Image: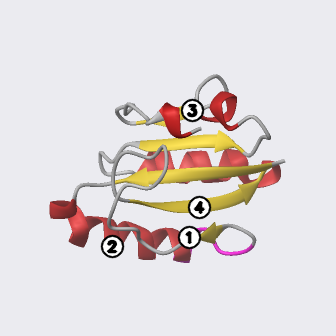
Amino acid sequence: MKYHAHVFFELDQTAQVQELHLRLQEVLSGSVTVSRLLYKAVGPLPKPMFQMEFSQDEFAQVKYVLTQIFHGFSILIHPLLENEYLAHTQYATWIGTPLNLNLECL
């Protein structure tokens, strides 16, 4: 099973999130993909963010690293499922403050 982690930020946190983005690329090398920064809300995701994709084998490591260095950002971790609503709600895990997602997009 594959997972996504979404690290949300405010536009005035650009310097901090760029630093975190680079650090995660260094620390989580291998089959963890750290995508580019998106400076606007997309789909059900309510804020600018970047995404990470990883397998179940890496879940514990990714969650541990994010918990240790999240710097107060809200982070959503969810499995990739056919039912995206359930993936983003019932099966979702939050690190930091949970955000209200735009679930009508799902």
Which residue sits at x=54%, y=75%? 25
Q: Quadrant of residue 46?
A: top left
Query: Which corner quadrant holds the C terminus?
Result: top right
Tell whether position 55 is magenta. Answer: no
Q: Earlier in the sequence, mark 3 or mark 1?
A: 1
Task: Read off the residue under disc 2.
Answer: 19
The kind of residue tagged 3 is Thr
Residue furthest front in the image: 104
Secondary structure, mark 2, is helix
| Element at label 1 | helix
Residue 99 coordinates in the image, percent (x, y): 37, 33
Q: Nearer the viewer, mark 3 or mark 1?
A: 3
- Magenta-colored span: 26-30
According to the image, label 3 marks what residue?
A: 93
Q: CA distance from mark 4 to mark 3?
A: 14 Å
Q: Whole-percent x and y of residue 40?
A: 33, 62
Please say if 55 is above or below 46: below
Residue picked out by circle 1: 27
Quick check: 56 left or right of 84? Answer: right
* Kind of residue indicated by mark 2: Glu
Mark 1 or mark 4: name the one nearer the start of the chain: 1
